[in-house]
Amino acid sequence: MVLALPFVIGVLAALPFGGRMRNLGSARFRWLGLAYVALAFQIAAFPGSSLPWRTPDGAAVGLWIASDFLLAAVVVRNIRLPGVALVAAGLGSNLLAVLANGGHMPALPRALADAGLHYTRLMNSELMAHPALPWLVDRWAAPHWIPLANIFSVGDVGIAVGGFVLGLVLTGARAPGRRPRPATT
C-alpha cells in the first residue's frame, strides 16, 4: 500500500503536465510475477479478519521477511526505472529495521498515540519503546485526512516518494513551461 497510493497520485498529478495514462502500457516491469508471489506471502502471513485462517507468529514473520526479499529482487531488477532507487532504499531501510528487531517493524509508542492506535502487536508491527536502529522504525503518524492513514518510517517515505516519481515519469509528464520534444523518425 505504501507504494500503490503514491504511484496513483503521481499518475494523476502528471495529467495536467502532459502525462498520459496510455504511456503506462509501455512501461517494462521485469519479474512482476515475483511481486505477486510476494503479495501472496504477505496475505498468507497476515490474512486479517476476512480470511478463515490465522498464521502462527513465527511462520508469519518468516513469510513476511521472505516476501520482502522477493520484493527486493523485483526492485533490483527494475532499478533503472525512475524512482525505483528510492523504493529500493526505503525497502532496504524497512527490512533492516525488521531484521534488527526480531522480525517485526517496531512502532514507537508516541507514533501509535498520535495516530490514535492502541496495540502491542498488529500484523508485522510491534510496539517497542527502545528498538534497535530507532531512526528506521515506524516513528511518525500520518495526518488523519490521508486515506488509510497510519504510522510510518523513513523507509516508507522513500518508498512513497519513489512510487510518486515512478507514476509521474512513466506517464510522460513534463515540467511546466517545457515543450514536448519533437518526434524523430
Image: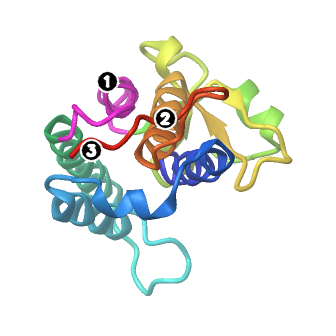
The type of residue carrying mark 3 is Asp
- Quick one: SS at disc 3? helix
| Image disc number at residue 68 | 3
Identity of the residue drawn at 45% across and 33% down: 162
The magenta region covers: 78-103
Badge 1 local density, few (<14 within 10 Å), some, or many (20+)? some
Identity of the residue drawn at 14% across and 40% down: 77
- Quick one: SS at disc 2? helix
- Quick one: SS at disc 1? helix
Looking at the image, is mark 3 or mark 2 nearer the viewer? Answer: 2
State how far apart marks 3 and 2 are (Cα). 21 Å
The type of residue carrying mark 2 is Val
Identity of the residue drawn at 21% across and 65% down: 37
Q: Mark 1 points at which residue?
A: 96
Question: Which quarter of the picture shows residue 115?
Answer: top right
| Image disc number at residue 165 | 2
Counting the numbered discs, the total is 3
What colouring does the structure picture have?
Answer: rainbow
